[in-house]
Image: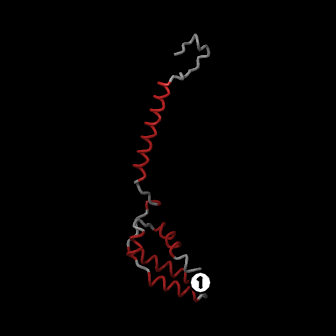
Amino acid sequence: MFNSVNNPFGRRIESSTSSDTNSNKQKGQEHQEKERKLLEENEQDEVRIGGLPLLTEDDVIFMVKQYISNIKAEHEGDEKIQKKADKWLEKFDVKKFMKKNPTLTSADFYMVMFMETDSITK
């Protein structure tokens, strides 16, 4: 719209007409819509820590027993915690645990177990 005579500094001057503004807004909205769609598609991908394999039921049972024995070893003199740990282990249902945490890796296991057994030491 402006030529070099009207614009002696050689800078680009944007027009403030509504047609330019609307087309810029529309391009921006289309770009945002494309980005949003890409993000939604990428959110479906699950990321496992370090690409570790998923735990099987046998792995979980072994690791739970080891985790509870570590709790018992840490609180060797406290009879109340010993009983709570034994009781928790008796009630532990591996099928229910695996259903609640289907994509569990060994790195995730310790975080989940800490949350599950937090009441034992209190």
For residue 25, above or below residue 2? below
Residue at the (39%, 67%) spot, across then down: 102
Quadrant that contains the C terminus: bottom right
Percent across and percent down for residue 74 are 58, 81
For residue 47, above or below residue 94? above
Percent across and percent down for residue 16 are 54, 23
Q: Which residue is mark 1?
A: 75
Give whichever of 65, 33 is nearer the camera.
Answer: 33
The type of colouring in the image is secondary structure
Residue at the (58%, 12%) spot, across then down: 6
In which quarter of the view is residue 62 placed? bottom left
Residue at the (50%, 71%) spot, across then down: 110
Q: Secondary structure at mark 1?
A: loop
- Outermost residue, front side: 18
Percent across and percent down for residue 60 are 42, 74
- Label total for image: 1
Give whichever of 71, 100 is nearer the camera.
Answer: 100
Percent across and percent down for residue 23 are 45, 28
